[in-house]
Image (cartoon, helix red, strand yellow):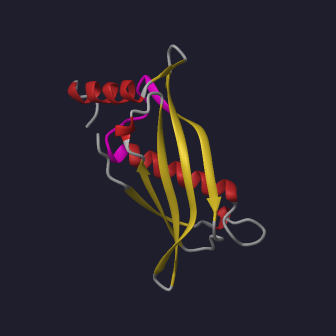
Amino acid sequence: MKFEPVSLTLQVRPNDLDSLGHVNNATVLEYLEAGRWLWLDHHNLRHGQRILPVVARIEINYRREILPGEVKVITKIEDTEKEYRYQAVFCQTVEIFTNGTATIAVDARVKVGFIDAAERTLKSLQDFLEENIAAKALGGVS
């Protein structure tokens, strides 16, 4: 299955800044999470079904400080043809803009696993995708 990258533009809020006047590292994790939720929504892969995506690991590189202004979070998934059984890997960047030029301030790899919310057991990426396809077929997802 092929999925296109999704882009989210956010405005840095005053409460996102730390005492040095740049975005706090923990807030960057929130930006990345917002990007992943938008990616799921864009591809009609609904959270809140029985099988839920959960973050298992994040590798993050902070390359530049993020100052007040706009940022763009770009989210894509690694090739699902690789047959990851119990995980998906998102590649994400946060771009900042200086004089109209985009620069990567953060890059991250986020490994996501899939959990059956009722049974509390590990499920596969394929199980997650199949559940969403079935929900669409029943009219549960628009």
In the displayed structure, would residue 115 be above or below residue 65? Answer: above
Q: Residue furthest right?
A: 19
| Magenta region | 41-53
Quarter that holds the N terminus: top left
In the displayed structure, would residue 14 be above or below residue 42? Answer: below
Identify the residue at image location x=43%, y=22%. 50
Residue 128 falls in which quadrant of the image?
top left
Which of these two is toward me, 135 or 89?
89
- Find residue 5 and report its horizontal and vertical position in percent: 36, 55
- Find residue 94 and report its horizontal and vertical position in percent: 53, 63
Q: Is residue 103 left or right of residue 26?
A: left
Identify the residue at image location x=69%, y=61%. 24
Identify the residue at image location x=43%, y=34%. 47
Q: Residue furthest bottom?
A: 99
Quarter that holds the C terminus: top left
In the displayed structure, would residue 73 be above or below residue 33? Answer: below
- Find residue 70 and report its horizontal and vertical position in percent: 51, 71
